[in-house]
Image (spheres, coloured by chain):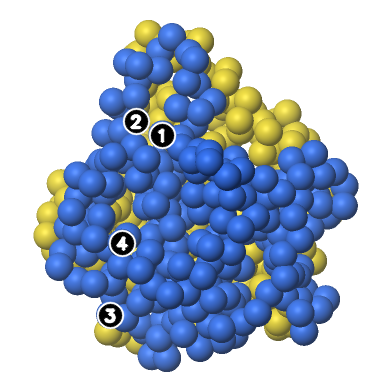
Chain colours: A blue, B yellow
Amino acid sequence: MTITITAFERSPDGGKGLARDTRVRWALEEVGQPYEVRLVSFKAMKEPAHLALHPFGQIPTYEEGDLALFETGAIVLHIAERHAGLLPDNPNARARAITWMFAAVNTVEPPILELANAKILEGDKPWTKERLPLVEGRVRDRLKQLSARLGSADWLDGGFSAGDLMMVSVLLRLRPSGILDEYPNLSAYVARGEARPAYKRAFEAQLAVNRPPEGQPVRE
Amino acid sequence: MTITITAFERSPDGGKGLARDTRVRWALEEVGQPYEVRLVSFKAMKEPAHLALHPFGQIPTYEEGDLALFETGAIVLHIAERHAGLLPDNPNARARAITWMFAAVNTVEPPILELANAKILEGDKPWTKERLPLVEGRVRDRLKQLSARLGSADWLDGGFSAGDLMMVSVLLRLRPSGILDEYPNLSAYVARGEARPAYKRAFEAQLAVNRPPEGQPVRE
């Protein structure tokens, strides 16, 4: 059955790979599943046809036969459960890898989203300059703990898993802020993720949609 | 094998059931699994023994034989996968229930966490009064979409599932703000969750640990 995902017609990041379809593309590349992409405009994302697929009017979605899913973490887990390559066989190791998926989206990503909101949604507010260090502090609190746990390991728990795919993707959102570079082992961890052939194919595929016109840099 | 979870020695909410151990207690009650609780002080949560179990120094954790997990969503999913009662048998319906678990923690909870941070961590800041309506607006954006999807249904997708358990638990955090009451179908949805016998047992169990001294109200 054909797998179809949705992605931005034009990603707000201009092709830096931070839109969440990159996470799903990466998972599909890791397990070697071909997929098709349906591009959705900002306008169409808020219309009934797309809201029927994704109640929060976002991308990505995932369609395969009569199954329709939304929510990146759930899509990546669905792919990982059905195809070899993203979860260990041992049941305990598998449960721990899924733990890291949830840790990525529910413990590490929320302060990073809050930092993004502070800059994007409140960038013009009078309080933002004074408030940003507080929000950045909450991001650093999490990164310090994550850095301590990762130590000198390549991945969070044994071999590369869907947990690492999600965590690397979440941490990538921080790169423009420079905060990631304060934690050399996390920075190296993210670089290891980006160096995977499956990530590179996923990144190139989203860039092909969003590539800026000749001569213009990828938007920051 | 005995299941042991961790919980606050003294919950910051004074027994209102908003600490995340209540979610795990609820899941265990739904599937009829007995469990033991180890209480952890705020000080002990940041010490090496607990950090080995939970790298972010939080509760709850889950131990069963040689398996140790952290992160509430992952623990609830682990319980739901191993015992009947929290996930449908049909594979597509099961994947959709898991989608709602991720939607609860990665789409609906982040703005609610941001609102909590604005009140608790930034309550004394000069910008908070002016900023709160913005943050509340982001919460309302999500609730409006969730309310539209739920409509007049009892649960998010067919029968009660782990997705509803997580979503109700996330929405419960909003009750003190009054925002939940603006969406009558969501308010009724949360009340349906609280009316489940398994939820009541979970709530009573956490209250038994945190019950305020005679004559004092449960803290807001």
**Mark 2 to mark 1: distance in Å?**
6 Å
Q: Which residue is mark 4?
A: A191
Q: Which residue is mark 3?
A: A158
- Residues at marks 4 and 1 touching, judged by CB atoms closer than 8 Å: no
Which residue is pictured at 23% across the width and 46% down the height?
Answer: A181
**Mark 4 to mark 1: distance in Å?**
22 Å
Residue A186 lies, in percent from the top left, at 25, 57
Which residue is pictured at 80% across the width and 39% down the height?
Answer: A43
Left or right: B49 with respect to A134?
A: left
**Do we see residue A116 in this rendering?**
yes
Q: Return the chain for callout 2.
A: A
Q: Amino acid at mark 3?
A: Gly
Same-subunit check for callouts 4 and 1:
yes
**Which tag, 2 or 4, sits closer to the chain's start?**
2
Number of residues whose C-alpha sits closer than 10 Å to that of mark 3, classed few (under 14), some (14–19) or many (20 or more)? few
Which residue is pictured at 74% across the width and 36% down the height?
Answer: B144
